């Protein structure tokens, strides 16, 4: 009769099997890493807008490349509200027209920020929101704006409320998508399509005329522009920022 394996031998086999499994996962699942693209994403035309280490490809609105107030914090772009010099919205150096934008954001307690698109950079405009509409980034549980209709997280700021509230609490990561396709727009938040609208139509002009932007002649007029991360004076983080341009 053959000798039965000892308990120690069985334990070693289990440990070795676990080690092999962990090694396989580390090799086979590179997509789990932050601020990176899978091979499929690369094939599909996605490009990283943030490398997780630097502000390369970004600049301060109407200012220099990079920023003194936007810093790298554990692989995320973070607005350091303690910095007083060189403040301002951070914008992409390049302009975009038709695209899918994907990113993750989290906001500090009682915080406010936003993702602003079709931004025109020109010295005659002293803020990104004078030209670009905004996907609101907000702590709905605490910030005063949460009491205002069309000012809550995920809203097309001051224009359209989300169809369903899917935002997570302050301090937790949210996944947002913005699709711009020849004026047809979609906002997604945490896997749910929350806002749909079409720009540059009579209906769009009427909606803007009934909002706080009615006196801003250039608001929502551009068909392309920079993408901005808003400096609203509150701590906020962005990561996994990627874009796929559409034809």
Image (tube, rainbow, N blue to C red):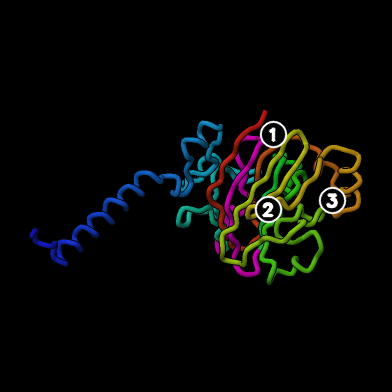
In front: mark 1 or mark 2?
2
Q: Would you say 58 lies left or right of 26 here?
A: right
State which region is magenta.
Answer: 82-111
Q: Earlier in the sequence, mark 1 or mark 3?
A: 1
Residue pointed to by mark 3 = 213
Q: Would you say 49 lies left or right of 127 here?
A: left
The local secondary structure at tag 1 comes to loop
What's the distance in space between the residues labelled 1 and 2, CA to CA? 21 Å
User: Which quarter of the figure is the C terminus placed in?
Assistant: top right
At x 77%, y 47%, the residue is: 196
Residue pointed to by mark 2 = 192
Q: Is residue 83 magenta?
A: yes
At x 58%, y 60%, the residue is: 106
- Mark 2 neighbour density, 10 Å: few (under 14) some (14–19) many (20 or more): some
At x 27%, y 51%, the residue is: 20
What's the distance in space between the residues labelled 1 and 3, CA to CA? 23 Å
The local secondary structure at tag 2 comes to strand
- The percent coordinates of residue 23 (x first, y second) are 30, 49
- The percent coordinates of residue 177 (x first, y second) are 64, 47
At x 55%, y 60%, the residue is: 80
The prevailing secondary structure element of the residues shown in magenta is loop
- Mark 3 neighbour density, 10 Å: few (under 14) some (14–19) many (20 or more): some
Residue pointed to by mark 1 = 98
Q: Earlier in the sequence, mark 3 or mark 2?
A: 2
Looking at the picture, tell me which residue is in the foreground, 12 or 27: 12
Can you name the residue that lies furthest to the front here?
A: 1
Exactly how many numbered labels are in the figure?
A: 3
């Amino acid at each position: 009769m053959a000798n039965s394996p000892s308990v120690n031998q069985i334990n070693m086999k289990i440990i070795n099997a676990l080690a092999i499994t962990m090694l396989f996962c580390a090799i086979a699942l590179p997509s789990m890493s932050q601020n990176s693209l899978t091979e499929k994403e690369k094939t599909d035309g996605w490009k990283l807008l943030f490398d997780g280490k630097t502000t390369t490809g970004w600049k301060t609105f109407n200012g220099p490349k990079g920023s003194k107030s936007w810093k790298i914090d554990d692989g995320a772009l973070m607005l350091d509200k303690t910095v007083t010099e060189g403040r301002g919205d951070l914008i992409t150096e390049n302009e975009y027209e038709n695209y899918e934008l994907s990113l993750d954001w989290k906001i500090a307690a009682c915080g406010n920020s936003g993702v602003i698109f079709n931004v025109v950079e020109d010295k005659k405009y002293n803020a990104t929101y004078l030209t670009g509409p905004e996907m609101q980034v907000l702590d709905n549980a605490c910030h005063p704006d949460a009491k205002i209709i069309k000012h809550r997280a995920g809203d097309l700021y001051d224009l359209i409320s989300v169809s369903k509230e899917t935002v997570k609490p302050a301090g937790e990561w949210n996944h947002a998508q913005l699709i711009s396709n020849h004026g047809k727009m979609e906002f997604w938040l945490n896997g749910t399509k929350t806002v749909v609208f079409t720009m540059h139509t009579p209906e769009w002009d009427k909606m803007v005329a009934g909002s706080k932007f009615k006196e801003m002649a250039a608001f929502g007029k551009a068909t392309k522009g920079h993408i901005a991360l808003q400096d609203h004076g509150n701590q906020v983080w962005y990561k996994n920022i990627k874009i796929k341009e559409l034809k």
